[in-house]
Image (cartoon, rainbow, N blue to C red):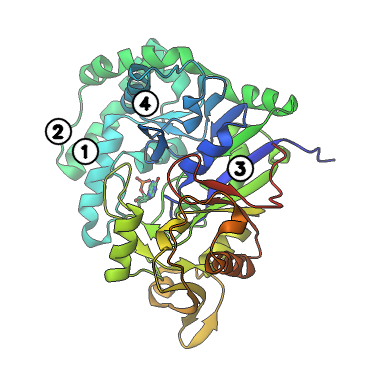
Amino acid sequence: MNKKCNSLAVIGAQWGDEGKGKVVDYLTAKSSLVARFQGGNNAGHTVVTGDNTFKMHHLPVGILYPEVLCVLGNGMVIHPSVLVKEIDELQKRGVDTSNLRISEKSHIILPFHQALDNLMEGKKGDKKIGTTGLGIGPAYADKAYRCGLRMIDFISPHRFNSWLEENLPFYNQLLNKIYNHEGFSPEEIINEYQPLAERLSPYVTDTSQLVLDNLEEEKNVLFEGSQGTLLDLDHGTYPYVTSSSTVAGAIPGGLGIGPRYIGDIMGVIKAYITRVGEGPFPTEEKGDLGDYMRQKGGEYGTTTGRPRRCGWFDGVIASYTARINSLNGWAVTKIDVLGGLENIKIATSYYLKGERVDRFPSTLEDLYSVEPTYEELPGWEEDISEIRVFDQLPQNAKNYLEALEDITGVKVSLLSVGPEREQTIVLPGASFYTF
Ligand code: IMP
């Protein structure tokens, strides 16, 4: 029998950058433990608290709350120098990071992973994925090849040394022979990485047991997804995806707990949609409207600074990602950005080869050729960023949200009307708060 558990998963339901950092930050205040289960420093969260802006890549925003345990799970890939920089930066600003725990089974990103990522992209020319260039794909590939470096081996000097002895010659040959790159010397890597291993060592533990203990004690546990469902290795717009499983189904494997410990699953969507990197984007607005969303929504990547591609809310995508993750609530972010537009469009289905479809296609060819069918709704003039109660929203904003719910069959639980923590509205009757 499945017992009720106090856990909530927060999952990106578009192409990443949905504003999960803000939503997780809001929910973290009610949690005992926050755990990431996939991805690495390709993620980027910006959290604004008063005059402070924090940008984080590996660390869950829970790190800002000393009483909340923050777990980097076994499903993650970790870039030691970036993580140590993140820790240092927080400590310099007075944040206590002793609540951090890193899985001994997480995998390590090394300099040749990053070099390979960029060289492989360069070779692909106009077929490039548009990765973040941080070595994520090669590090996950090594894990799957069964020759990756795990955290538990990284923090043991003799195991790290023998791993390098065994594996570095292969990478150097690959870099030399295929990409004409000079490669890396073992001394260079040891000198830079050994001190980083020592810095990370105190945080490394059996996080699977820790997460389980918190769940068994019925404490509030938050599972924090990174990237988005359309960047999932299986269910995203392959091959224009990241190299990890970003969906709710990846939580148990990425943390080492059983699936019966997943309680509610909240999908985060922007009131419009964005994507960074290459790949199909059916509702993309390349003209003035896209520019309007980019400027007003500040749509530039936290990790790479790249301008994000922008477009209208895509109901076909939202219905698909609701299904893949079995979502039972939406957090809709950046609805304030749509204020001031005369009309707002929502894609409700696609035309594909002259036929109407409401299923998200699986081939790139179909995804590039679909024509969205839009429902057009009247916009609102008012600035809604100061509103904190659902009833006070302009009627047209309420109608817009109702249309999202009708298309996707999932209720809106949380609404974000600006970047600050307080600019959040919990909807009446939101079913989530077992918290
Ligand atoms: P990678 O994860 O660096 O391998 O990049 C693969 C694809 O995922 C590229 O299109 C990236 O732009 C995209 N991507 C990776 N992480 C994020 C993220 O956190 N937000 C949005 N897009 C991302």
Which of the image's four quarters has the N terminus?
top right
Looking at the rendered structure, the kind of residue marked 2 is Glu
Check contact, mark 2 vs mark 1: CB within 8 A. yes
Q: Quadrant of residue 7?
A: top right
Residue 11 position in % (x across, y down): 55, 47
Binning the other alpha carbons within 10 Å of mark 3 as few (below 14), some (14 to 19) or many (20 upward) gives: many
Assign a secondary structure to mark 4: helix
C-alpha gap between disc 2 and disc 1? 7 Å
Residue found 63% across the figure and 22% down from its top: 210
Q: Where is residue 80 in the image (x, y as percent from the top left)?
A: 35, 24
Label 1: few (<14), some (14–19) or many (≥20) C-alpha neighbours in 10 Å: some
Q: Mark 3 points at which residue?
A: 9
The amino acid sitting under disc 3 is Ala
Q: Earlier in the sequence, mark 3 or mark 1?
A: 3
Q: Can you give x and y, in whole percent of width and height, for residue 309 in the image?
A: 32, 60
Real-space CA distance between mark 3 and mark 1, rounded to the nearest whole angstrom: 39 Å
Q: Looking at the rendering, in which quadrant would you find the C terminus?
A: top right
The span from disc 1 to disc 4 (Cα, nearest Å) is 25 Å
Residue at image mark 1: 175
Residue underneath mark 2:
182
Q: Residue 228 carries which label?
A: none
Nearer-N-terminus badge (3/4): 3
Quote the CA–CA distance across marks 2 and 3: 44 Å
User: Left or right: 320 with respect to 343?
Assistant: right
Q: Which of marks 1 and 4 is nearer the N terminus?
A: 4
Asked which quadrant contains residue 184, the reply is top left
User: Residue under circle 4?
Assistant: 83
Labels 3 and 4 touching (C-beta < 8 A): no
Q: Is residue 427 left or right of residue 235?
A: right
